[in-house]
Amino acid sequence: MIREYRPNDLDAIMNIWIQGNEQAHNFIDIEFFKQNYDIVKMLTPMSTIYVQDLNGVVGFIGLSEDYISGLFVEKSYRHQGIGSALIEKAKQHHNELSVHVYKQNNDAIDFYLSQHFEIIGESINEETNYPEVLMRCNVEHKVKIGKCAL
């Protein structure tokens, strides 16, 4: 079940966040993420967060306005549609979504492309000095009238 964040989800979210960053960004020294752990933990509740709860949090998406500040799924639950479901939940509440992805994170780029995002720019991340792409998705909202969708 995808639901809104609750304060008691924070520890599970942070565990998924640190492990996910270590696995997805093995080209960045893990100390970078460890050094930023406390600030991320403090800022996380200020975002809009949806979690995938399967008798415990196994994935989450964090949003700041229309920007995806984080999307992580526990390793053993990946490739089961959880990331796609979290993106769909975010699309229900936004007309546009954007996200930065490290260029070396091919799996994430491929995932976002499969979710109808497109690459609209490139830059160097100021904190890590690694290249990243900016991806954006314009969301189509369909209004249902009877059996028709407009």
Image (cartoon, grey):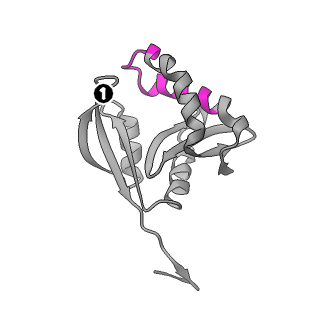
Residue annotated with mark 1: 126
Which residue is located at x 46 percent, y 40 percent?
Answer: 69
- Image check: 82 left or right of 55? left
Q: Crowding at label 1, few (<14), some or many (≥20) Cα neighbours within 10 Å?
A: few
Position of residue 150 relative to residue 141, above or below, is below
Compared to 107, does 112 lie above or below? below
90 or 40: nearer the viewer: 40
Circle 1 — which element? Answer: loop
Q: Amino acid at mark 1?
A: Glu
Say whether residue 75 is visible. Answer: no
Q: Position of residue 50 (x, y in %)?
A: 60, 47
Predominant SS of the magenta segment? helix
From which residue to which does the magenta span run? 13-31
Q: Quadrant of residue 140?
A: bottom left
Q: Position of residue 144 (x, y in %)?
A: 54, 79
> How many numbered discs?
1
Q: Residue at x 45, y 45 (%)?
A: 68
| Residue occupying the point 55% across, 48% down | 81
Position of residue 114 relative to residue 142, above or below, is: above
Q: Please state the horizontal and vertical placement of residue 119, each as a whole percent of the image.
A: 28, 47
Question: Residue 102 versus residue 46: which sits nearer the camera?
Answer: 46
- Assess whether residue 107 is covered by the magenta stretch: no
Image coords of residue 105 (percent x, y): 36, 32
| Left or right position of 145 against 30 | right
In the rendered image, is residue 43 in sight? Answer: yes
